[in-house]
Image: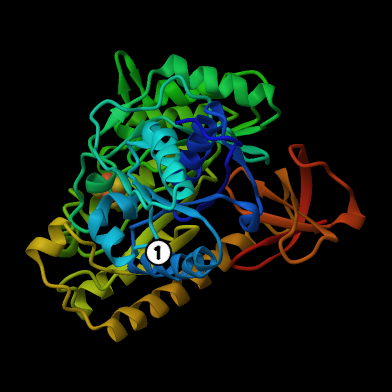
């Protein structure tokens, strides 16, 4: 049955850029079917929560959010839909635990959302509660033919592949996003041209492991170069590659194409070979360091960032010291450092014991953050006295009297607007006068 007035949807997105990109697809699909979107949760008939399952903290945030929605739903009619990795991972267990949920849809099932929401809204109108779940994983779904309804800004996300076949033992992604599928390069280029026509200046190509991208004779190096060749696009970024199979052709493409940003996010995860093996990462600490050296030799000035997990199952002090040594040796530009948290259904949850006490995990994270912070501050100080090109993004988070943008290496630069106004989306050159571990200061 059709709905009388177009229902208003409010969508909230948690987690990684892939979820941001998926929310843009969901918006496009629902708008096509006559739904309208509102930024104001108070006016919404439907609240969709696009969730993340990567760490326990992500789950906690979403449970807090659902408890807020429970209070709203007590006061007025509201359909609540939970999307994304947490929905896919916990399935009906989540719906049982949180009875306010009307709709659950996993990352491969978003095409079913219009009918699931229509059914839930119609049932609600008749005073009934009808729950709808769409949680099948697909080997083929890449959402071809749907142009995302993008958030404003200078950057457009483009998903180039979905899923992951790597099965790192700690990671839930292969279970929540299914098998690897690469999108047709022509569809990706069409999206890039559309984004350029709408005024986006930067494209970020997304995949769980972009180095596995394959479509007939296309690999990721060829794809990113073709995207960077599109007129109107000033910068192209990508995330994430896996260190196990970083191809020389991609290093060459980054080195030689002026529009491919000189920044690589290269997840390390641990510096102990024993832990890397338990994590099923399929490289050693020496392999990682050799790759860093190869990249730096071919792309001078490259900015390298990473992810590290502290306190994985059975990680000893000695293992942790190996990570500290690697971090000190590699001198990467920055790192996201997290406590290990066991994820349901992963290989680690089935085979290993999460036996490092939480307090020890916390101490290791603090120690490593402190070490990396000093390295980052030191590396950032190298920019003092230099002119750097910045893509302007808007106002600084802390003050509207300051402008903010990013270097090619994705480092945040702020400057007093009084020293020169620049529109978002423009490339400007700033002289760096100071630096901290988080920010460069331009004049
Ligand atoms: S490469 Fe490993 S960590 Fe990354 S998404 Fe795949 S399984 Fe998870």
Q: Secondary structure at mark 1?
A: helix
Q: Looking at the picture, does residue 26 appear above or below residue 191?
A: below
- In the picture as drawn, the residue positioned furthest to the left comes out as 351
The quadrant of the image that shows the C terminus is bottom right
The quadrant of the image that shows the N terminus is top left
| Picture coordinates of residue 151, whole percent (x, y) | 62, 40
| Picture coordinates of residue 15, whole percent (x, y) | 44, 55
| Residue in view at x 29 percent, y 68 percent | 323
Q: Looking at the picture, does residue 338 appear above or below residue 115?
A: below
Q: Looking at the picture, does residue 244 appear above or below residue 315?
A: above
Of 224 and 251, the residue lying toward us: 224
Image label count: 1
Res 226 seen here: no
| Picture coordinates of residue 318, whole percent (x, y) | 20, 77
Res 79 seen here: yes
Of 176 and 250, the residue lying toward us: 176
Q: Quadrant of residue 145?
A: top left
Of 289 and 195, the residue lying toward us: 195
- Is residue 443 left or right of 246 when viewed as pictured? right
Tell me if mark 1 has few (under 14), some (14-19) or many (20+) residues whose alpha carbon lies within 10 angstroms of its own: some
| Residue in view at x 33 percent, y 50 percent | 85
- In the picture as drawn, the residue positioned furthest to the bottom comes out as 359
Q: Looking at the picture, does residue 313 appear above or below residue 295?
A: below
Of 232 and 293, the residue lying toward us: 232
Q: How is the image coloured?
A: rainbow
| Residue in view at x 88 percent, y 47 percent | 421
Tell me the residue that label 1 is attached to: 58
- In the picture as drawn, the residue positioned furthest to the front comes out as 126
- For disc 1, does the CB lie below 8 Å from ligand 1? no
| Picture coordinates of residue 339, whole percent (x, y) | 33, 71
């Amino acid at each position: 049955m059709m709905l009388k007035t177009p229902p208003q949807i409010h969508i909230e997105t948690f987690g990684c850029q892939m979820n941001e990109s998926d929310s843009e697809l969901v918006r496009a699909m629902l708008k096509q079917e006559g739904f309208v979107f509102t930024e104001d949760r108070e006016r919404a008939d439907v609240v969709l929560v696009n969730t993340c399952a990567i760490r326990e903290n992500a789950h906690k945030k979403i449970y807090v959010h659902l408890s807020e929605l429970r209070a709203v739903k007590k006061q007025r009619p509201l359909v609540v839909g939970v999307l994304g990795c947490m929905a896919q991972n916990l399935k009906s267990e989540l719906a049982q635990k949180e009875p306010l949920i009307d709709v659950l849809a996993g990352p491969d099932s978003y095409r079913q959302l219009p009918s699931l929401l229509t059914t839930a809204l119609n049932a609600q109108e008749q005073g009934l509660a009808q729950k709808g779940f769409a949680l099948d994983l697909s080997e083929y779904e890449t959402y071809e033919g749907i142009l995302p309804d993008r958030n404003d800004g200078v950057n457009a996300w483009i998903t180039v592949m979905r899923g992951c076949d790597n099965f790192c033992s700690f990671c839930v992604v292969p279970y929540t996003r299914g098998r690897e599928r690469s999108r047709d390069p022509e569809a990706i280029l069409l999206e890039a041209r559309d984004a350029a026509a709408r005024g986006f200046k930067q494209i970020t190509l997304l995949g769980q492991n972009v180095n596995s991208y394959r479509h007939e004779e296309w690999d990721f190096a060829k794809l990113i170069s073709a995207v960077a060749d599109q007129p109107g696009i000033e910068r192209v970024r990508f995330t994430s590659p896996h260190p196990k199979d970083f191809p020389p052709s991609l290093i060459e493409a980054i080195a030689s194409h002026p529009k491919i940003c000189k920044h690589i996010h290269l997840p390390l995860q641990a510096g102990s070979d024993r832990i890397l093996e338990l994590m099923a990462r399929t490289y050693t600490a020496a392999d990682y360091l050799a790759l860093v050296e190869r990249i730096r030799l071919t792309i001078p000035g490259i900015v390298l960032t990473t992810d590290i997990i502290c306190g994985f199952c059975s990680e000893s002090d000695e293992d942790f010291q190996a990570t500290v040594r690697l971090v000190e040796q590699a001198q990467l530009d920055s790192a996201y450092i997290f406590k290990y948290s066991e994820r349901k259904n992963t290989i680690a949850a089935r085979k290993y014991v999460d036996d490092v006490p939480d307090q020890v995990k916390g101490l290791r994270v603090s120690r490593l953050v402190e070490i990396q912070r000093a390295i980052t501050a030191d590396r950032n100080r190298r920019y003092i006295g230099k002119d750097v090109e910045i893509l302007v993004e808007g106002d600084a988070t802390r003050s509207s009297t300051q402008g903010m943008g990013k270097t090619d290496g994705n480092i945040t630069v702020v400057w007093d607007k009084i020293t020169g106004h620049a529109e978002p989306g423009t490339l400007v050159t700033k002289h760096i006068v100071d630096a901290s571990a988080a920010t460069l200061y331009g004049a």
